[in-house]
Amino acid sequence: MKTKLTIVVMSIVLLNCALCHAEPGTVAGLQPGLRDALLRDAACSPADHPSPPKPGGLETPGVEPAPAEAGPSPMLDAAVTTQDIHSAAGANVGVIVTFNDACHCRDSACGTYVYLKNNAGFKLALSGAFSSMHAVRVFKRGYPSLTGKVQISKAQVESTVYDWNGKTYAPSLCATITQTAGRKVPSILHHDCAKAP
């Protein structure tokens, strides 16, 4: 039964990923509140080249933000892709920002930040290094679930579904998808999700 449920959920996730629309740009081109939040949470300088967050992790890269008086951030020119997040009612409630630069990416995994709108601007709800991150059409407490994927090897992908719990996005369904040579259908192994720190 769990295998069938996992296959159905992963099929829905893959279909929704195909329907997602991402907008490329730079950090400087983002709206001011989002740009400020991103500069605060995702600070990185090319000289530092920190390792990205752990796959599927709920943390921000380990680089301290530059002091406000340090002048314009070199991160303003960093390439990013944004995806709007819509509530069950269709309202724009947040955005997924994925970096596409050498400072935030290692192999196929790039720093990804999920922000939800609030009265003060934008609140960080999830961050980590992912090969892809998308909102799906499954809603918990009015917010869409998110699916994040991390390429483990050429044949394996770790896929995690994150549900809104009222405070943050938390992992709820985790699986390793393995595409074996000569097989049309991949093997999907459901497993317990790692606990957030």
Image (spheres, grey):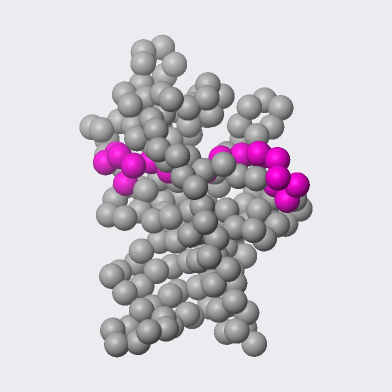
Residue that appears at 49% across and 47% down: 21
Q: Residue at x 46, y 44 (%)?
A: 22
Q: Extreme left residue here? A: 47
Determine whether 13 is above or below 129 in the image: below
**Which quadrant is home to the N terminus?**
bottom right
Q: Does residue 158 appear left or right of residue 141 in this picture?
A: left
Rendered-image quadrant of the C terminus: bottom right
Q: Can residue 71 be found in the magenta stretch?
A: no
Q: Quadrant of residue 180?
A: bottom left
Camera-side residue of 21 and 177: 21
Q: Residue at x 38, y 30 (%)?
A: 26
Percent position of residue 126, x then y: 55, 47
Stretch of the chain drawn in magenta: 87-105
- Closer to us: 47 or 136: 136
78 w.r.t. 104: above or below: above
89 w.r.t. 117: above or below: below
Residue pictured at 46% horizontal, 50% vertical: 128
